[in-house]
């Protein structure tokens, strides 16, 4: 052993853990009204499953690999929702294991699990995006280091390397985990871990797991550098550092007592002192995020492990006297304080119900969209309706084409949401849609012999564009007044001339060069 640390509690209480896991996964299906469809941002990740690779312009490949598995399982919305819910349940299980490793008993485990269950993690786990696995990877990496403090077995550095490597294959955010952890170890007595060969076994495993994407980046001229620069210039530069810090308080606002207890426990509670590096790592990571103008949700992964630490300290502190009566009260308080958030932060109400009673949403500024104006629904919710309507319009247009036209057709949309929605809901029934947006610019089919263009666009068809086709037919428009895609039109453009085909080719080349950072 490296230190004299507390032994794990005698009982892991796996039955209780199983109950929490079942509740966690079930709850993810219950906090969304059935009228809602998938979210715009989910479609790109799902469509990447149709183009499996070791990397993509916008993200690493892990979410695409999971999307490929979803296709094998039937490619239904139920399976799309399952995997974020699973990653959330695994996060809860790792927190449970961390409490056990820190010596916590049943109350500490239940408290930590309750705090994870009723938190921003529930919201993150609604959508099929890299964020759910990102939080799991952060939590697992912290946990493996906790185990390495007390256990010299080689499996923990291997598992640590696997967690970091898979985390990097999911989202490059794990760089900030390492950037916070290294100075934290140097600052504490656990700096000895940096001198052990098994720690560098973890580094080697992480590199080996991450190697496929690293090689892909090299082959494709490091598009990650362009993507990070684009993200910095277009989004992160507008992030206010004070807002970043304020929003951290909202993520686990109902469990702030547990987070404060984590800080106090690491300072005052002797059995937790060997793990002080966790507290320092969190502080260093938050400092890095603040310095880099990071989006607030990038930091969610630092908190589950703190909930484990804080729960252990509160169990110890509140075990005797009047303090013990606070134990059940805190569990109830965490759940009750979260209830108001359920109503406004989750799509529990139908769009029509929200339109009729917008007060709570308007009061919190949730009806303000990116355009700076108030709308009938929160933007996130408006991004979850009428995709089937659009897909049905496209399919209706496709069925109007002759067999020859269908064989020489290209479907072009304005953005990845539209292209992905068509490809998800019309999968196998019509050719795949593409866009000049994100990874779709690499997925265009050959343009030789092109006879028809199906155009899905929010903009009116300009006369200057229409003259390049022999005939233009409007199939229809999205009619739902509450949808963000309201008014999006589907056109059939027959008989394109050589000039417009050349223009498409040129735009594809221009976008590909731009994504490589070339002039």
Image (cartoon, grey):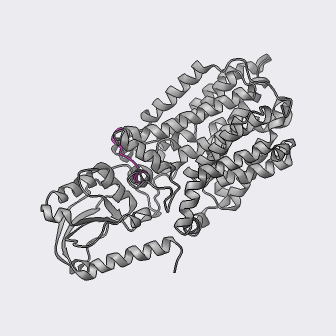
- Does 354 appear above or below 99? below
Q: Main secondary structure of the magenta part?
A: loop
Foreground residue among 365 and 338 = 338
Q: Residue at x 47, y 63 (%)?
A: 372
User: Would you identify the image quadrant in which residue 162 lies?
Assistant: top right
| Residue 35 colored in magenta in the image | yes
Residue 152 locus on image (x, y percent): 78, 34
- Does 145 appear above or below 53? above
Which quarter of the rendering shows the N terminus?
top right
- Does 442 appear above or below 160? below
Residue 338 locus on image (x, y percent): 56, 35
Residue 213 locus on image (x, y percent): 55, 57
Q: Is residue 420 left or right of residue 315?
A: left
Q: Residue at x 55, y 44 (%)?
A: 133
Residue stretch rendered in magenta on the structure: 34-43
Q: Residue at x 48, y 51 (%)?
A: 366
| Residue 198 colored in magenta in the image | no
Residue 394 locus on image (x, y percent): 23, 57
Q: Is residue 236 left or right of residue 432?
A: right
């Amino acid at each position: 052993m490296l230190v004299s640390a507390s032994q794990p509690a005698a009982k892991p209480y796996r039955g209780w853990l199983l109950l929490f896991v079942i509740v966690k996964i079930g709850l993810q299906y219950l906090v969304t009204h059935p009228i809602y469809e998938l979210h715009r941002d989910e479609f790109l990740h799902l469509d990447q499953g149709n183009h499996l690779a070791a990397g993509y312009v916008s993200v690493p490949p892990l979410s695409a690999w999971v999307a490929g598995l979803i296709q094998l399982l039937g490619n239904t919305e139920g399976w799309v929702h399952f995997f974020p819910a699973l990653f959330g349940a695994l996060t809860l299980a790792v927190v449970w294991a961390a409490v056990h490793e820190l010596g916590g008993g049943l109350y500490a485990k239940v408290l930590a699990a309750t705090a994870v269950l009723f938190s921003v993690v529930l919201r993150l786990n609604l959508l099929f995006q890299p964020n759910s696995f990102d939080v799991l990877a952060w939590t697992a990496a912290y946990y493996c280091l906790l185990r390495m403090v007390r256990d010299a077995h080689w499996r923990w550095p291997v598992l640590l390397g696997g967690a970091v490597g898979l985390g990097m294959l999911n989202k490059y955010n794990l760089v900030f985990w390492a950037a916070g952890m290294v100075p934290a170890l140097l600052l504490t007595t656990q700096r000895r871990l940096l001198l052990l060969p098994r720690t560098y076994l973890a580094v080697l495993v992480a590199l080996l797991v991450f190697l496929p994407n690293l090689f892909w980046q090299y082959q494709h001229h490091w598009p990650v550098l362009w993507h990070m620069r684009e993200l910095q210039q277009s989004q992160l530069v507008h992030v206010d550092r004070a807002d970043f810090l304020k929003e951290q308080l909202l993520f686990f606002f109902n469990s702030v007592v547990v987070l404060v207890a984590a800080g106090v426990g690491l300072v005052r509670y002797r059995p937790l002192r060997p793990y002080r590096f966790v507290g320092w790592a969190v502080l260093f990571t938050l400092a890095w995020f603040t310095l880099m103008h990071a989006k607030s949700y990038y930091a969610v992964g630092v908190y589950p492990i703190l909930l484990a630490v804080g729960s252990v300290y509160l169990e110890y502190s509140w075990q005797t006297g009047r303090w013990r009566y606070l134990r059940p009260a805190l569990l109830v308080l965490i759940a009750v304080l979260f209830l108001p958030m359920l109503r406004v932060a989750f799509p529990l109400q139908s769009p029509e119900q929200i339109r009729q009673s917008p007060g709570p949403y308007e009061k919190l500024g949730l009806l303000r969209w990116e355009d700076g104006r108030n709308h009938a629904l929160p933007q996130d919710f408006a991004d979850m309706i009428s995709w089937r309507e659009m897909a049905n319009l496209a399919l209706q247009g496709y069925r109007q084409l002759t067999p020859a036209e269908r064989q020489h057709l290209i479907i072009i949309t304005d953005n990845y949401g539209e292209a992905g929605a068509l490809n998800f809901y019309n999968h196998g029934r019509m050719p795949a849609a593409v866009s000049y947006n994100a990874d779709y610019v690499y997925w265009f089919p050959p343009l030789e012999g092109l006879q028809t263009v199906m155009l899905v666009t929010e903009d009116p068809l300009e006369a200057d564009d229409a003259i390049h086709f022999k005939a233009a037919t409007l199939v229809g428009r999205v009619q739902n007044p509450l949808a963000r895609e309201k008014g999006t039109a589907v056109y059939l453009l027959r008989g394109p001339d050589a000039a417009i085909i050349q223009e498409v080719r040129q735009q594809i080349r221009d976008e590909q060069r731009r994504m490589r950072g070339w002039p």
